[in-house]
């Protein structure tokens, strides 16, 4: 199927690993042009090089702290100057803070909300003009099922995710007047570098598959496994497609059946 993404310019944040890198790879395969950013430019370049066969004319790379409004506006300005416009945006920069409330500092709480809220809002307001000028512009915020189903071990991250989900709905209402769609993808447990590092630090005698299967069972994941970055990227790319032109203000779970809400 042709997703009609050929020569459409998509901004992807947090593109140096995991879901961001998988999304970048999939968009390039669909013929899109990519403006990718991450905090570490050298790591980002190495990640893009790992894809192989990427036409340099179809990709723009930059270092950018998405919580810094000035850096974001400079990055977006450079992208529009380089490619002439922006048709899509993937707000993917994120992390999880594994700590109960009793072990969380005020600074950590502020940092979580800063990244989740301003990490998306800075990009959306900076790209609003180019997206409005595009044919069927689209924004996807990469969020988590924690937004609707909080966990005590991730208390502050759950709260920040819920705030981002609420903000995404508000942005969908606001940007609809421009003809720009805004949607969310809500992740469950996904096999990324974060989980690989936790496995290495766990001291377990199990191999990774057995270790992750135990965690999946403990978290009540119906499919009994972690998801892959590619499985998440597919949903993101589908929402970016003009063929999803009547879908806005919604969210799609990619969690293997871990959601217990209706």
Image (cartoon, rainbow, N blue to C red):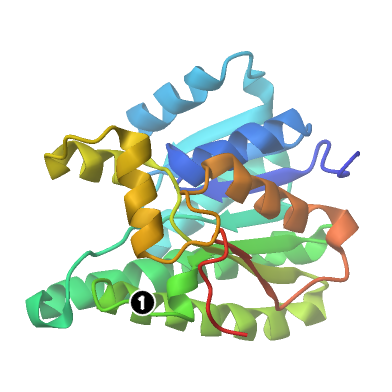
User: Left or right of 236: which side holds 92?
Assistant: left
Q: Position of residue 74 (x, y in %)?
A: 48, 52
Q: Residue at x 88, y 44 (%)?
A: 4
User: Which of the 4 image quarters holds residue 34?
Assistant: top right
Q: Position of residue 75 (x, y in %)?
A: 50, 49
Q: Circle 1 is placed at which residue position?
A: 158
Give the answer, above or below, for where 75 lies relative to 257. Answer: above
Quadrant where the C terminus sits is bottom right
* Number of numbered callouts drawn: 1
Residue 110 visible to an observer of this rendering: yes
User: Left or right of 129: which side holds 118?
Assistant: left
User: Which of the 4 image quarters holds residue 216?
Assistant: bottom left
Q: Residue at x 43, y 64 (%)?
A: 119
Give the answer, above or below, for where 128 lies relative to 74. Answer: below
User: Which of the 4 image quarters holds residue 45?
Assistant: top left
Q: Which residue ends up furthest to the top in the rendered image?
A: 53
Q: Nearer the viewer, residue 232 or 80?
A: 232
Q: Position of residue 149 (x, y in %)?
A: 44, 80
């Amino acid at each position: 199927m042709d997703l009609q993404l050929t020569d459409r310019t998509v901004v992807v944040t947090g593109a140096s690993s995991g879901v961001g890198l998988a999304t970048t790879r999939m968009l390039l395969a669909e013929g899109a042009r990519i403006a990718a950013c991450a905090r570490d430019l050298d790591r980002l370049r190495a990640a893009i090089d790992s894809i192989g066969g990427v036409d340099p004319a179809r990709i723009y790379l930059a270092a950018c702290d998405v919580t810094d409004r000035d850096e974001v506006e400079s990055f977006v300005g450079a992208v529009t100057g380089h490619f002439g416009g922006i048709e899509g945006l993937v707000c993917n920069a994120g992390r999880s803070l594994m700590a109960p409330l009793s072990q969380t500092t005020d600074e950590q709480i502020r940092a979580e909300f800063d990244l989740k809220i301003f990490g998306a809002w800075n990009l959306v307001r900076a790209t609003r003009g180019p997206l409005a000028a595009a044919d069927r512009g689209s924004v996807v915020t990469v969020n988590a099922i924690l937004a609707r189903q909080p966990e005590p071990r991730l208390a502050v991250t759950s709260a920040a995710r819920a705030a981002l989900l609420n903000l995404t709905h508000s942005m969908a209402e606001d940007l609809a007047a421009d003809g720009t769609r805004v949607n969310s993808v809500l992740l469950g447990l996904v096999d990324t570098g974060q989980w690989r590092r936790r496995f290495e630090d766990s001291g377990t005698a199990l191999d990774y598959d057995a270790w992750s299967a135990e965690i999946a069972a403990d978290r009540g994941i119906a499919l009994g496994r972690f998801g892959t970055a590619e499985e998440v990227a597919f949903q993101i790319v589908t929402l970016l497609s003009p063929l999803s032109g009547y879908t806005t203000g919604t969210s799609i779970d990619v969690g293997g059946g871990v959601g217990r809400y209706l």
